[in-house]
Amino acid sequence: MNMMSVSFLAEAAPGVANLAIFGAMIACGLIILGVGLGIGLIAKNAVTAIARQPESGGRIFTAMIVAAALIEGVSFFALLVCLLTVIWFK
């Protein structure tokens, strides 16, 4: 679906724009919830692993930070897509 057909759809049915904005806002909430749960699970498992093997704490911490950064990067991209959807249909 190209940009012209999306704008035509928004102009043809005014309710579609409202549904798109509503869907984008629901998606933003789900993204934040998923990111919070994901990073929380990473931290929980990292702390458990460090408690079991304190000598490998540095490597575990580094892996935890890398995984959390990747999750944050994907979440920022997803939030950007959701917010651009809101701006496009507004």
Image: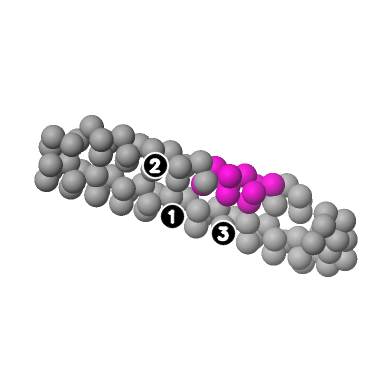
Q: Is residue 20 visible?
A: yes
- Residue 23 % position (x, y): 63, 61
Residue that badge 1 annotates: 34
Q: Closer to the camera, 31 or 58? A: 58
Q: Start and end of the magenta stretch?
A: 75-84
Q: Closer to the camera, 78 or 53? A: 53
Asked which secondary structure carries label 1, the reply is: helix
The residue sitting at 76% across, 50% down in the picture is 88
Between the C-alphas of marks 2 and 1, the distance is 12 Å
- Residue 75 % position (x, y): 51, 46
Figure quadrant of residue 76: top right
- Looking at the image, residue 60 sits to the left or right of residue 26; the answer is left
In the rendered image, residue 80 lying in the magenta stretch gets the answer yes
Asked which secondary structure carries label 3, the reply is: helix
**N-terminal label among 2 and 3:** 3
Q: Nearer the viewer, mark 2 or mark 3?
A: 2
Residue that badge 2 annotates: 68
